[in-house]
Amino acid sequence: MMPKHFLTLLDLDEGEAKRLIRRATELKQLRQRGEDYRPLVGYTLAMVFEKSSTRTRVSFEAGMSQLGGTAMFLSPRDTQLGRGEPIEDSARVLSRMVDAVMIRTFEHETLTRFAEHSQVPVINGLTDRFHPCQLLADMQTYVEHRGSIRGRRVAFVGDGNNMCHSYINAARLFGFQLCIACPPGFEPDPDVLATAPDHCTLMHDPAEAVEDADLVVTDVWASMGQESEEDQRKAVFADFSVTAAIMAKARPNALFMHCLPAHRGEEVSAEVIDGPQSVVWDEAENRLHAQKALLELLLAPQPGSEPPAY
């Protein structure tokens, strides 16, 4: 039987996604109460990093430890992947030795090729095209603060990057309306946008996108691998900073999210990210809990009740 992978949000159906979000909050509460819950004793997660990370590495490593398992960090400097071994061969070998593989890499094709030849679940820790684990944490955070996101209005301001693509998938899966504001030439990939015509609106005015939004999201203007474009992008994106004036266009109880790391004074002002509408620290913590729920789902699935109404 083929393993269940998590390469994009759409590898979950609506019921699985709802149960996973609910389970993430349950696991968070278990930890807050100090209860010992270790369903993954004897399990090993290989973590393959071609891109550097803070939150992804710490949350997966801590999560596996808290669930009773072991996480193994692998970088290109330490493995044959960095010396030209075919991805397919690495997948065949690694998946005979561990119980799951998390990959954080550049090209999405690297991830999909690995998954095609893996005997165990493969998790997308980030690619240039999608960042689905972050969206699990974002959805958990919104539900914890405001309840159901179905039918809500979400504004994404900035580059049409992997986070934007993942918000497009989330709009389909969780049933909200997404307004995307990008500078001309920096829109999300048309093929991704075309998958959610009933849920997404593309525009070039951040104030218009944020109007009456329940959630405002942004990301850095230059992602890893785009450092040489940083100065050019600062000029292009100068009018796409989420400032207090922009947030004032949203609903009074709107939340602000950013996947971090953030550059205060660029994509977001310090007043916003450090202000009362910001939930970025809860959002960052929830990477741990959402990924624990994901690992439990992929490695130790438990029979569950019907998904909640949200």
Image (cartoon, rainbow, N blue to C red):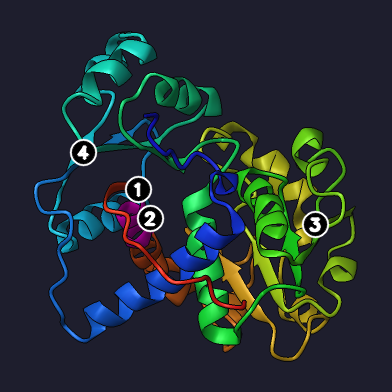
CA gap, disc 2 to disc 4? 19 Å
**Of the residues shown, which amino acid type is indicated by label 2?**
Leu
Mark whose residue sits in front, 2 or 1: 1
**Of the residues shown, which amino acid type is indicated by label 4?**
Phe
Q: Residues within 10 Å of mark 4 (few under 14, many from 20)?
A: few
Look at the numbered disc 3 and give the secondary structure of its residue: strand
Q: Which residue is mark 4?
A: 73
Q: Residue at x 19, y 33 (%)?
A: 98
* Residue closer to the observer: 271 or 223: 223
Location of residue 252 (image quadrant): bottom right
Q: Residues within 10 Å of mark 3 (few under 14, many from 20)?
A: many
Q: Which residues make up the magenta segment? A: 291-297
Whether residues under marks 2 and 1 lie with C-beta atoms below 8 angstroms apart, the answer is yes
Q: Earlier in the sequence, mark 4 or mark 1?
A: 4
Kindly identify which numbered label has been placed on residue 165: none
Q: Which residue is mark 2?
A: 294
- Residue 163 appears in the rendering: yes
Q: Earlier in the sequence, mark 4 or mark 3?
A: 4
Q: Earlier in the sequence, mark 1 or mark 3?
A: 3
